[in-house]
Structures are given as structure tokens and as C-alpha cells.
Image (cartoon, rainbow, N blue to C red):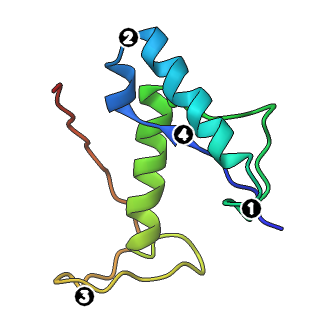
Amino acid sequence: MYCLYAVAESGMRQMMEPRINEVMTYIDSLMSNTDINPFRYNLMNGSRVLSGEEEAIFSWISVNYLLGNFAGTYKFHSCRNNFHSTNVESAIRIGFIY
């Protein structure tokens, strides 16, 4: 059985702490309900808000995975389909405040 994790990104960090806790508690209640979620969900870890550093790392991994820059990974076919890199790529994410 697969394990599922619920994490939030920068938009959630902009909210007030009581509202963050309310949303995360609701997510935990949904995710731990086996009637609607067939995946294993560990309430000990629960849902949480990623730090900016964690969010950047996941973005970097995603970009390089889609470009096929890791051994044995899927090569994303886009307008850059002739791009064959042996190096990893950089990623810059710029967020905004609502």
C-alpha cells in the first residue's frame, strides 16, 4: 500500500497560525478517513507546511526529473524535445502574496 503525505506550500505560510491549524486539522481528518482515501496516511507525521527551503528542493527535483536529468527518469517532451543535457538545471520560483 502506498503512503500519502499532505504538504502545503507558500500560500499557506501567508495565513494566520489559527487558520493554518484549522485547515491542516481538516486535511488530516479527510486523509485519515479510509472511506474516501485508499492510501495509508500517518497521522503522526500528518499534514504540514513546507519551509521555503523544502519547497525549493522539491521544485528543483521536479524540474530535473521532468527533463530526464536523473538516471532512468522520464524525459519530458516539450518544445525543447531536442534538448539533451548531461547537467542538471536550475529552477527559480517566484511567488506572490495575495
Q: For the view shown, which residue lies furthest in the front direction? A: 35
The tally of labels here is 4
Which badge, 1 or 4, is on the more N-terminal residue? 4
Residue at disc 4, secondary structure: strand
Give percent across and percent down for residue 16.
38, 11
Q: Decide: is 2 above or below 5.
A: below
Mark 2: amino acid: Met
- Residue at the disc numbered 4: 7
- Residue at the disc numbered 3: 81
Residue at disc 3, secondary structure: loop
Q: Nearer the viewer, mark 2 or mark 4?
A: 2
How far apart in space, not on screen, are marks 4 and 3 (Cα)? 31 Å
Mark 3: amino acid: Asn
- Residue at the disc numbered 2: 16
How far apart in space, not on screen, are marks 3 and 2 (Cα)? 43 Å
Which badge, 1 or 2, is on the more N-terminal residue? 2
Which numbered circle lies on residue 39?
Answer: 1
Mark 1: amino acid: Phe
Seen at 15% across and 27% down, the residue is 98
Seen at 74% across and 61% down, the residue is 39
